[in-house]
């Protein structure tokens, strides 16, 4: 079976589970993990589903659709076709799936099957974006092992649809997490979820109850996985205990933060659980974090541009965060009102921002982010970094350094003659190349 994943790392984890399930055994055609984070994200998977069905050649072909699109309060949404009427005419070719399968099997044989032996070759000639897995153990679909440690969220952020699709926050048991890591052969494990900072808190709003630092300490003690990466993390969950664990060389020194805005006024309108002051204090601590391996820490961030009521001064506060705290990997999004399919509280707020202003602010913040990113690369020039090779072809290879510098043939130099293979960690020298 083929698959297409839209957006988040959590989708990657549950895609592996579905493709490894009894429910999809011997089924044909494609599994789609959908996303509702923005209007653009929704339009992408809707278009993909429609175009894919129009290209079907066999009557038995179907799209198996899961995750946030068809889910409400962790169950299948009975109003799915009312919310997405543009898919109604294709309903006989769409099978809606729960969040995760009831029963999994251990190995895949012909169900995930490329048409030739080249990893990454596209199965869908009409859709060159479509991912392809080798017909092997599904832990090998991705070079990294994506691992959900918690699910769902209790926050009521006014811009977010997740609370409508999901249920109350729940954490996975530590023994189960460690067992899954130890059963994987991955060189890198990515801890993911809807709100991972809240791991083991009774409610995601009770950020003082987080036990994420304890979980990381246990993973470091009871597993041997070389690299542990933490996906998007809320500012309010970062405490001194967590910062201390972040110094360990096995923890990936790149931290992606769910910031959303640098303005107190906008953070309050968003119903975020931290202030502008807390945000700046936390970013400063991360900025000066001294690791035991002396690798420079890189920071990523999610920023919403053009939230209702955002003035030029509010926007400048977000922009200055990028500059002041060296945010090297920026995920900036224009605010989505979700008018077409859902209603969110922020879409009812006064002072909605025009698309023209959103586009202007997006261009400005992304331009600044590129400058900051290049400056970070310069600081790493001639440093020896550990890189995980993810793709190899006859003339090139790609992957990432531990502090999230992209690997290519031009910017990383091996220190000795060695065979370059996928899923292996190397120590190579980074040589900064000025972008054209």
Image: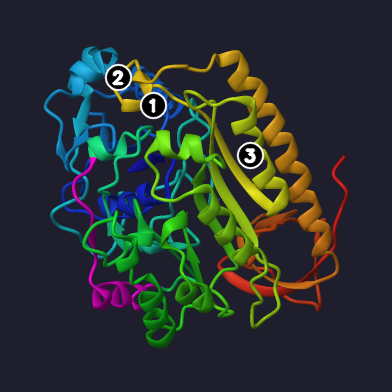
Residue 223 placed where, x, y %?
40, 83
Q: Which numbered circle lies on residue 317?
A: 3
Residue 302 placed where, x, y %?
53, 44
From this view, report whether residue 296 is shown above or below residue 114: below
- Do tag 3 and tag 2 residues touch (Cβ < 8 Å)? no
Residue at image mark 1:
42
Residue found farthest to the bottom: 221
Marks 3 and 2 sit apart, C-alpha to C-alpha, by 31 Å
Residue at image mark 2:
341
- Magenta segment: 166-184
Residue 57 placed where, x, y %?
33, 22
Marks 3 and 1 sit apart, C-alpha to C-alpha, by 29 Å
Q: Is residue 338 visible?
A: no
Q: Which numbered circle lies on residue 260?
A: none
Q: Which residue is drawn at 56% across and 15% down?
A: 355
Q: Sequence-wise, which precedes: disc 2 or disc 1?
A: 1
Marks 2 and 1 sit apart, C-alpha to C-alpha, by 9 Å
Q: Sequence-wise, which precedes: disc 3 or disc 2?
A: 3
User: Would you say 257 lies left or right of 161 here?
Assistant: right
């Amino acid at each position: 079976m083929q698959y297409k994943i839209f957006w988040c790392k959590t989708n990657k984890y549950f895609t592996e589970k579905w493709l490894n399930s009894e429910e999809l055994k011997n089924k044909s055609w494609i599994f789609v993990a959908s996303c509702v984070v923005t209007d653009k994200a929704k339009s992408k998977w809707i278009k993909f589903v429609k175009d894919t069905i129009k290209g079907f050649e066999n009557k038995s072909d179907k799209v198996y659709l899961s995750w946030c699109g068809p889910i409400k309060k962790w169950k299948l949404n009975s109003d799915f076709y009312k919310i997405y009427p543009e898919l109604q005419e294709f309903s006989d070719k769409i099978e809606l799936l729960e969040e995760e399968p009831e029963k999994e099997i251990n190995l895949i044989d012909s169900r995930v099957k490329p048409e030739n032996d080249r990893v990454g070759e596209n199965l869908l000639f009409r859709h060159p974006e479509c991912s392809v897995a080798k017909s092997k153990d599904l832990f090998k679909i991705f070079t990294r092992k994506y691992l959900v440690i918690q699910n769902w969220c209790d926050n009521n952020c006014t811009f977010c649809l997740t609370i409508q699709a999901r249920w109350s926050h729940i954490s996975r048991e530590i023994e189960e997490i460690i067992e899954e890591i130890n059963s994987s052969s991955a060189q890198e494990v990515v801890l993911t979820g809807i709100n991972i900072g809240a791991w083991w808190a009774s409610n995601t709003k009770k950020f003082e109850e987080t036990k994420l630092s304890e979980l990381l300490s246990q993973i470091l003690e009871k597993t041997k996985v070389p690299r542990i990466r933490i996906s998007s993390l809320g500012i309010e969950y970062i405490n001194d205990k967590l910062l201390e664990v972040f110094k360990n060389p096995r923890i990936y020194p790149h931290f992606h933060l769910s910031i959303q805005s640098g303005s107190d006024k906008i953070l309050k309108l968003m119903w975020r659980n931290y202030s502008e002051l807390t945000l700046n204090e936390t970013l400063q601590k991360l900025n000066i974090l001294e690791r035991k391996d002396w690798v420079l820490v890189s920071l990523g961030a999610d920023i919403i541009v053009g939230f209702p009521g955002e003035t030029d001064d509010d926007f400048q506060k977000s922009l200055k965060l990028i500059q002041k705290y060296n945010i090297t990997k920026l995920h900036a999004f224009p605010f989505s009102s979700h008018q077409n399919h859902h209603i969110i509280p922020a879409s009812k707020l006064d002072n909605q921002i025009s698309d023209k202003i959103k586009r202007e602010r997006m261009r400005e913040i992304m331009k600044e982010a590129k400058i900051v990113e290049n400056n970070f690369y310069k600081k790493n020039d001639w440093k020896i970094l550990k890189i995980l090779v993810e793709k190899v072809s006859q003339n090139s290879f790609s992957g990432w350094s531990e502090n999230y510098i992209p690997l290519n043939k031009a910017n990383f130099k091996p220190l000795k003659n060695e065979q370059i293979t996928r899923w292996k960690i190397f120590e190579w020298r980074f040589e900064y190349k000025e972008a054209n």
